[in-house]
Image (cartoon, rainbow, N blue to C red):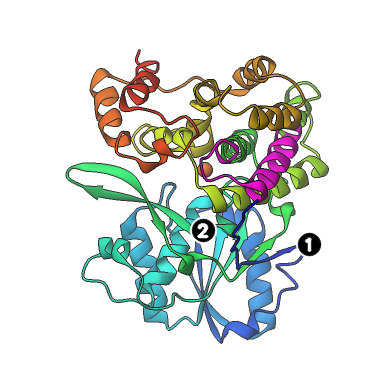
Amino acid sequence: MEYNHFMPTRLVCKKDCVKEFDFSKFGRKAILVTGRTGAVKSGAQGDVVSALERADIAYTVFNSIEENPSIESCAAAGSAAREYGADFMIAIGGGSAMDAAKAAAVYATNDFGSPLDIYLGIPKKPLPLIVVGTTSGTGSEVTAVSVITVSADGMRYKKSLKSPRLYPLYALIDPKYTYKLPWEITLSTALDVLAHAIESLYSVKAGEMSMLFASEALSRAWDALKKAHWQTFVEFRDINEDVRDELSYAAILAGMAINITGTCFAHAVSYPLSVVKYVPHGVACAHSLIPFLKTVRGEDPRRDDIFETAVGYGFEEFYEDLKKLLPEPPSLSYAEVDEFTALTSQSASLKNSIVPLTPSGVEKLYDAMHR
Ligand SMILES: [Fe+2]
């Protein structure tokens, strides 16, 4: 047996942990990096601000991070931090705000000739980063990765930035910020958790520890997602807090799993669907989850057992239940099928699953979305 584990972010999960947090150890000036509405609506920004004011810490807010954050927004947030003289950064939001803040914290302390040079290496330590999640999906709290949208050669695509320097210093997890999330966001973020857990389970980099995180995440996320769906559409009531708490914990566990293994082709295939067709990230990943499982199933009986034990029944029943939750895939033109295939075929993630996906396999997946 072998393992080699590194995840240096301190995780604090407790009711009101943000409101009660002592930010004074990080300095006297903070910059908050958020999207346009989620940070305020969830109540998280209010809690951060009250903790900062109590500690007499000055702050500014950079609140224009978009979904699928662009490299330009990340660089702009970094410049804002530098101009303000921020001692530390607080990201509030879902994966987009967290991923953008990871890069922004780097831009704040490093001088690059062009924003794209961030991919060549991170010479100086980024600003200390504290993240406050408002959704249950991304797992970005516990990973050394930031997925950024870049424009080059007339195309827009997602490019992962990876460095141990990207780990947040602290992740403050209070699931109450997710209690009022609408169904669409709850579904998409929970599907992202499922994708993380399933792709990690079947990764070539999986080991004892990642499989432990992945199986626990899968079991909890699948059970909670089915309960959330039942409460919303059969009982016509709000999703209860226990279910929300489960989704939050499952998201962190799945993040721990992909922190070890990375993601596989369901994620790689999803990226153009999000950047060009505006499909929410988790839904975009989930469109390839059944083909992913059909590709890898049978290659390693132990992982198949872990999968079936975690979801509580066989693959075929799982496919049927997942199909009931999935919205319609986007309609792709032939030109889009070709463009997305060319883009995705270069992804290293295609080789990260125990059965790799070939470029013709990629084309088949997009072709199935042609209308
Ligand atoms: Fe994801």
Query: Which residue appears at 70% of the width and 32% of the height?
Result: 306
Q: Is residue 283 visible?
A: yes
Q: Is residue 370 left or right of residue 324?
A: left
Q: Is residue 89 left or right of residue 136?
A: left
Say how many tags the image has: 2
Q: Position of residue 331 (x, y in %)?
A: 37, 19
The one nearer the camera, 340 or 331, is 340
Amino acid type, label 2 = Met
Residue wearing tag 1: 14
Residue 369 vertical placement versus 192 (above, below): above
Query: Which residue appears at 60% of the width and 50% of the height?
Result: 255
The one nearer the camera, 233 or 370, is 370
Snapshot quadrant of residue 106: bottom left
The one nearer the camera, 351 or 147, is 351
Magenta-colored span: 199-224
Find residue 170 and name its label: none
